Amino acid sequence: MTAATFDRAQLVDALRKVGLVAGDSAFVHLDLAALGASEGCASADESYALVLGALREVVGEAGTLIVPTYTFSFCRREEFDVERTPTAGGPWSPTAGFLEYVRALPGALRSRDPIHSVVALGPRAAELVSDVPPTCFGAGSVFERLVDAGAKVCVLGLPLEEATIRHHFEELAEVPFRYRKLFTGRIVEEGRPRKSGWVYSVRILADNGYPDGSRLEALARAEGVCRAAPLGKGEVLAVSAPEYRELTLRALAGDPWLTARGPAGDPVAFEAARVGACRPEVELPRDASMREMVDGLWRLHRHIVSDGYDAGLDALAGQLPMTVHEYPSGTEAWSWIVPEKWVCHEAYLEKLDGTRLFSHDDHPLHVVSYSLPFEGEVSRETLIGHLHVHPMIPQAVPFIFKYYERDWGLCCSRELRDSLTDDRYRVVIRTSSSYGTLKVGEVVARGASDECIVLCAHLCHPAMVNDDLTGVVVGMDVMRSLLARRDLRYTYRFIIVPETIGSLAWLSANEELIPRMRGGLFLEMLGRNFPHALMHSFAGDTEIDRAFAKALEEADPRAWTARFRELAGNDERQFNAPGVRVPMLSLTRVVRTAEPNAYYREYHSSHDTPELVPPGSLEESRDVVLRMIDELERMASENMDPRFRGDDGGRASSARELPSSPLSRGSMFSPLNGDTIPVNRYPGEPFCSRFGVNIDAYANPEGYRALFDILYLVDGTRDVAEIARTCEVSTEAVVATLEELRRRGVVDVR
């Protein structure tokens, strides 16, 4: 060997100098080429054996070795096979070669993380890497387990900043340049594939957020947390994981941008500058009528986190006193995660001769909402797999959204799709996803009591009117009337949200309000001449159910009612869900039909335009809502109490009573039976995509409904046998469903 290389004895000596001892759990990052390990060795395997042998000699039989086998599979939209997917970089790169060598060893155990998997060897391997929850750096992840186990992080031939555990600390510190993002895909274990979601704390893509751990490393060396020993062409470093966490959290508390390139600033502004988005200008006349609001806002590209949505909400905020709440991308709203901001810069489909068939400029619905960018020439077969059409109207462009699925897609009329006969086409989709803030508008009309009624509508459907801009403008006009009154017993809160995630963000940020919410009403699809339809709350027999049903019957003789979840499901689900149990009803104007998504023919399409809204329909719906509120107020006055007579509104436990800590591994193995009482681990409707619970509501409506029939009854008050009786299925079927949900981390047992 030359002077620049080293032998096993020298490596053993260096490892001991940096503090590794027998029995340690050591998470090892290395660059053998930087150390010169391969020089003088007959083969790569010989150098791998040299390094592994030295590590094993130092930690001994009682020690455990962990190495990264990162694949970034879900980030690359690839399937992750726990047993077969190679470490990123391939088996022939100097670093990945050693990691693949360890991964193939007998007894090596790999975590099922489809982005940041690791392999462990030793007596603590299963404890550290088995049954990890769906998060790279969050609670219960391998990195948290390493800290809890008192492991040491050992870095050979690399700077300390290459040790990935720092990102776990950054997530704990909630640094401003990183945020949680959900990735979805398929994980294969023992040859069986299943869908799953995985949460990865990603950085903002503006240069300010580029990782830079050099200042933290200098601090760790200066304070003696990081120990170093020379070896070959480089050095060996080691830190105690608990000490490194304490140092990092303390340093980031003083300077949250310490481990990023910087300079510090507003990450939303940095990302907006990178993406180059431009918010449209919207002007509404003062005291705009409902029709004027519709005409001024309907064309906006109102995706759930977008410039178009923000512009629409800002315009409405100029009409009434409104508080706009902001929830940054990555915010956890119980089990849900606020997504990124999305912008479509340009998108079109054309023939290879350049003939353009349609574009995003023609209509925003031509692009799947939250589509990934894509540019290229594709076969007709591939194109058809990504091209969506409306199920009922051959001439209409459908509204399709994939907020949490990583895929690209276009939409067009069925007539156009059926005319595509060429073998190949050119697709261009130029979109950007970036760190942003989800916005919820709140208008409050104060009453004599803090007990409140929540009105709700969503603003997030681009270039459509009846669903659900009509609900928004009716709610605005109702609040105008309520703000002018001085005799209200209840306080009324009107929230304007992006569908589902907006209500969850607002509810999870306002848990202290939940016990004071006596009920609510979701407003949607109120611009047609159909009879009004009232969908009852989950409980169905509360005073607010009775008050609203009575008033509706008097106000609209054609009106009809439905039980909970018998009509279009929207944000009322989140209020009625386990752990919340606020009895929120919904008011719509839809036809009676057994057909899914047939609430009106133009539903979720480019044909949902202002022409659908006949004169007087919005005013009729506004008056119906006010009549319902009057009845509620009358009943409260007769009770001589601003609250209903001790009625709990059908609520079960409050959100704070549900378990929110990571699922205990012990409960995972206790058997379920008819007497078992299951409980949701999170308040609100579970975020099924996050946990890999995927039943397509459109492709399999019966299966989707059966799943949610069970989920809505899992609230800690019913045993398995009662759930089975209520759902009219066997106890065995409920047990099987709950076992799967428990394995996915959605439910637990008491």
Image (cartoon, helix red, strand yellow):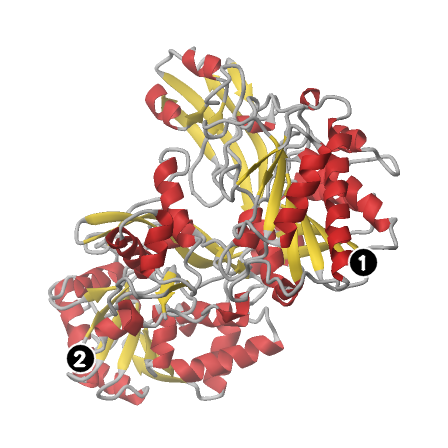
Relative to 32, is 604 above or below?
A: above
Q: Report the amino acid beneath label 2.
A: Arg
Q: Disc 2 marks which residue?
A: 56
Q: Report the amino acid beneath label 1.
A: Arg
As drawn, is 5 to the left or to the right of 151?
left
Q: Residue 280 location, x and y as percent?
A: 73, 36
Which corner quadrant holds the N terminus? bottom left
Dot 1: few (<14), some (14–19), or many (≥20) neighbours within 10 Å?
many
Res. 327 visible in picture: yes
Mark in front: 2 vs 1: 1
Of 3 and 633, nearer the camera is 633
For residue 131, the mark is none
- Name the residue at 80% across, 30% down: 292
- Name the residue at 67% across, 63% down: 645
Res. 457 visible in picture: no
Q: Disc 1 marks which residue?
A: 446
As drawn, is 173 to the left or to the right of 63?
right
Mark 1: which secondary structure? Answer: loop
